[in-house]
Image (cartoon, rainbow, N blue to C red):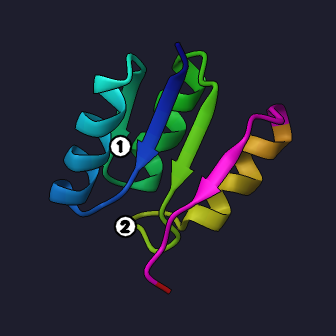
Amino acid sequence: MAQIMIVEDNQGTNKAICEYLKTAGHTLFPALDGEEALNIFRDNIIDLAVLDIMLPKMSGVTILHEIRKISNIPVVMLTGR
């Protein structure tokens, strides 16, 4: 199964997404802010990233730009905007 990074600052939403995907057999890497997300991304092999746009410390768009510098993994932008 896939290794998926979930970047969502709302703890309840982050936990719910992780629980749902975990039941499907995926390995999850939850992050609550942009800085944590980039650290996780650099330290692990991530197959898919789910990014919120409005995050503390760094926006989801900035994280996407940083990911694109070194990887072409699929990214799903999840936002209330």
Q: Residue at x 23, y 63 (%)?
A: 10
Tag 2, which secondary structure? Answer: loop
Q: Residue at x 48, y 64 (%)?
A: 52
Residue 42 place in picture, x, y as percent = 59, 25
- Tell me if residue 66 comes above or below residue 4 in the rendering: below
- Tell me if residue 80 comes above or below residue 33 in the rendering: below
Total numbered circles = 2
Residue 19 place in picture, x, y as percent = 23, 35
Position of residue 44 in the picture relative to residue 74 (left or right): left
Task: Residue under label 2, please give it.
Answer: 56
In magenta, the rendered stretch is: 70-80
- Tell me if residue 47 comes above or below residue 75 in the rendering: above
Task: Residue under label 1, please give it.
Answer: 31
Asked if labels 2 and 1 touch by Cβ distance under 8 angstroms, the answer is no
Q: CA distance from mark 1 to mark 2?
A: 11 Å
Residue 33 place in picture, x, y as percent = 37, 55
Q: Amino acid at mark 1?
A: Ala
Q: Amino acid at mark 2?
A: Pro
Can residue 75 be found in the magenta stretch? yes
